[in-house]
Image (cartoon, rainbow, N blue to C red):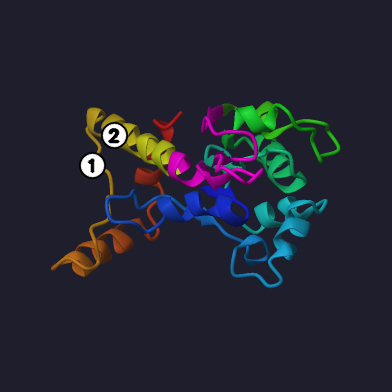
Amino acid sequence: FAYGASHASILSQELFYRAGGLAIFNPIMPSDVMLHTRPITLTTSMERLDGYASIILKHTPIKAGDILILHSVSGRNKAIIEMALEARNLGITTIGVTNMTYSSQLTSRHDSGKMLYEVCDYVLDNCGDFEDASTHIEGLEQKVAPTSTIAGCTIVNMMLIRTVEYLLEMGIEPPIFRSANADGGDEFNEKIFEEYKNTQIRITKIKSIIY
């Protein structure tokens, strides 16, 4: 499973139903924190709302032994930290993707006083600049061009590659989607949908190696 709010949700979408992607990735994309929400500032308010993440997790078919990737550049808002804490309490392994340069200079908005990187089992740094924007242009004080999306998508796809390598080393054929725009792609993917619709045994075997 993967979760992020606003632009951070792009990583969840990158992993989901993608040609060359694993069929067992599931995005958590509540509409209140997605970019189609209007007014867009509502997403900011929801990220800071007590109890919001607990409700989302409660209505997600995630359980002990699963893995949850949590993406937040600042790593300071209540929802992302609450989700990490709740997930760990449920026996879910958490992987935080964040900007350590940025996050380490901020204070938490969560009652625990913790940042995302302090409450996840594993932490991956996207190596971005403070505020994520990367480039100074003469005559403008504020930097432009954030890097978290391209860095984050590279990170999660490298995780995907290594996971597939582990599966093959274990003798397990991973369910990888083909492009729906390639001849035969729809038929190939339909077989994956059918095979993994209600099958728990092979999914459990796959999950076990991601640790």
Q: Disc 1, disc 2: CB below 8 Å?
A: yes
The kind of residue tagged 1 is Glu
Which comes sooner in the sequence, label 1 or label 2? 2
Q: Report which residue position mark 2 lands on.
A: 167
157 to 162, vertically: above or below: below
Q: Residue at x 37, y 59 (%)?
A: 17
In magenta, the rendered stretch is 123-152
Q: Can you tell which mark lies on residue 173?
A: 1
Q: Residue at x 29, y 37 (%)?
A: 164
Image coords of residue 151 (percent x, y) = 45, 39
109 to 166, vertically: above or below: below
**Nearer to the camera, 88 or 124:** 124
Q: Residue at x 76, y 55 (%)?
A: 52
Is residue 169 something one can see in this rendering?
A: yes
Question: Is-magenta flag for residue 154?
Answer: no
Image coords of residue 96 (percent x, y) = 58, 35
Mark 1 burial class by Cα count in 10 Å: few <14, some 14-19, many 20+: few
36 to 77, vertically: above or below: below
**Nearer to the camera, 125 or 123:** 125
Q: Secondary structure at mark 1?
A: loop
Image coords of residue 56 (percent x, y) = 68, 56
Q: Residue furthest toward the front? A: 139
**Nearer to the camera, 165 or 77:** 77
Total marks placed: 2
In the picture, measured across the screen, residue 167 lies left or right of residue 114, that is left
In the picture, measured across the screen, residue 165 lies left or right of residue 79, that is left
Q: Secondary structure at mark 2?
A: helix
Q: CA distance from mark 1 to mark 2?
A: 7 Å
Question: Is-magenta flag for residue 125?
Answer: yes
The quadrant holding residue 128 is: top right
